[in-house]
Image (cartoon, grey):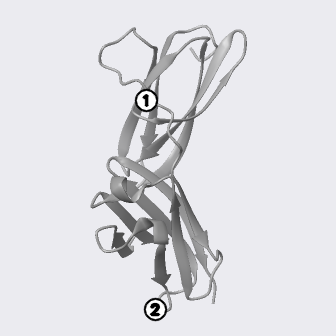
Amino acid sequence: DNTGKSTTNKASLNNQFHFAFPACKIRFVMSKGSYSVIGGIVEQLIENDTVSVYDVRVDAPSATTVEVSINQAGTSTHLLQYNFPIKPLVTISPNPFNAQTKIHLRGVSNSSANEKLRIDIIGIDGKLVKTFYSVTQNPSEGFSWDASAHKSGLYLIKVTLDENTISNKAFLIR
């Protein structure tokens, strides 16, 4: 029931493909109130006099089913209350690019990144092209990627910090 009358709901996202879908969106329309979400990250909350609309981001790994649940705060001891931090963001500039680009992170502090930050560059074929770790670079300075040895096309920039993942696309044009 996603009509704005419930105080609890669950969504299942079934990815039957052999590649991941990062940053999928699920929208929960709930009776007005404060809610806890497990299995996803709340990206936006919209409220009016009668409903609370939660937009939740979830990553769908290949060949798996991901479940996201939402319950009115205080109705379950197994759910985590979501705190609204600054949403991390990955930007690539220039994008599209020819041979060299820089990957920038916003909302990630040097201390929180420490050794937990990982940036994967994945080709359209799903193969890992390059990995950066924050232990070797300061995340506030960005990460330079020299793609001169790679062919033109779309690349996924996947940033993982602890258990959270954000991503963006980069276009290499020759």
Report the amino acid beneath label 1.
Val
Question: Is label 2 in a helix, a strand or a loop?
Answer: loop
Q: In the rendered view of the protein, which quadrant contains the C terminus?
A: bottom right
For the view shown, which residue lies furthest in the front direction?
111
Q: Position of residue 8 (x, y in %)?
A: 48, 13
**In this rendering, is residue 52 above or below 111?**
above
Left or right: 54 with respect to 16? right
Count of numbered labels shown in the rendering = 2
Q: Quadrant of residue 38?
A: top left
**From where the camera sits, is residue 18 visible?**
no
Q: Quadrant of residue 100?
A: bottom right
Q: Position of residue 74 (x, y in %)?
A: 40, 10
Q: Which mark is residue 57?
A: none
Separation of marks 1 and 2 at Cα, in angstroms = 40 Å
Q: Earlier in the sequence, mark 1 or mark 2?
A: 1
For the view shown, which residue lies furthest in the right direction?
49
Which of the two residues, 84 or 148, is positioned nearer the viewer here?
Answer: 84
Which residue position is annotated with label 1?
A: 68
Q: Position of residue 109 (x, y in %)?
A: 42, 55
Q: Which mark is residue 149?
A: 2
Q: In the rendered view of the protein, which quadrant contains the N terminus?
A: top right
Question: Is label 1 in a helix, a strand or a loop?
Answer: strand
Left or right: 30 with respect to 74? right
**From where the camera sits, is residue 68 visible?**
yes
Report the amino acid beneath label 2.
Ala
**In this rendering, is residue 104 above or below 89?**
below
